[in-house]
Amino acid sequence: MNFKRMLHTEFGRFLLSVILGLGVATMFREVCEGKKCLIFNGPVISEIDGKIYKFGEYCHKYSLTPVSCSKTKKIIKISNPEDIK
């Protein structure tokens, strides 16, 4: 029984602790499923469209401008706040 003998060495206890630690960590790991892995939190666009904001010394006006989609850029679907709940 090499396993029992290994438990009595310092390296054996260390190795067993690492294995048990990884096992326990996987039990409490958050699991991603599909598109739920990426969550983008930001303001509702209708609430900020056309308003003026100050950032540093400058004021900026947010305006919603439609552009054509590009295959080289990532497209993020924006949902309603009611859908998030």
Image (spheres, rainbow, N blue to C red):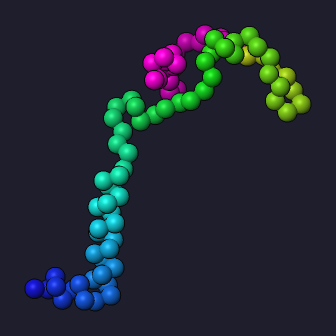
Residue 10 against residue 48 in the figure, above or below = below
On the picture, is 41 further left or further right than 62? left
Check the image and name the residue furthest to the right: 57
Please tell me in which quadrant of the rendered image residue 17 appears.
bottom left
Please tell me in which quadrant of the rendered image residue 83 appears.
top left
Count every numbered label the image shows and give the total.
0
In the foreground, 72 or 58: 58
Residue at 28%, 75% in the rendered image? 16
Residue at 35%, 58% in the rendered image? 25
Q: Position of residue 63 (x, y in %)?
A: 71, 12
On the picture, is 53 further left or further right than 19? right
Where is the C terminus found, in terms of image quarters? Answer: top left
On the picture, is 82 further left or further right than 14? right
Residue 49 against residue 27 in the figure, above or below = above
In the image, the segment drawn in magenta is: 63-85
Where is the N terminus found, in terms of image quarters? Answer: bottom left
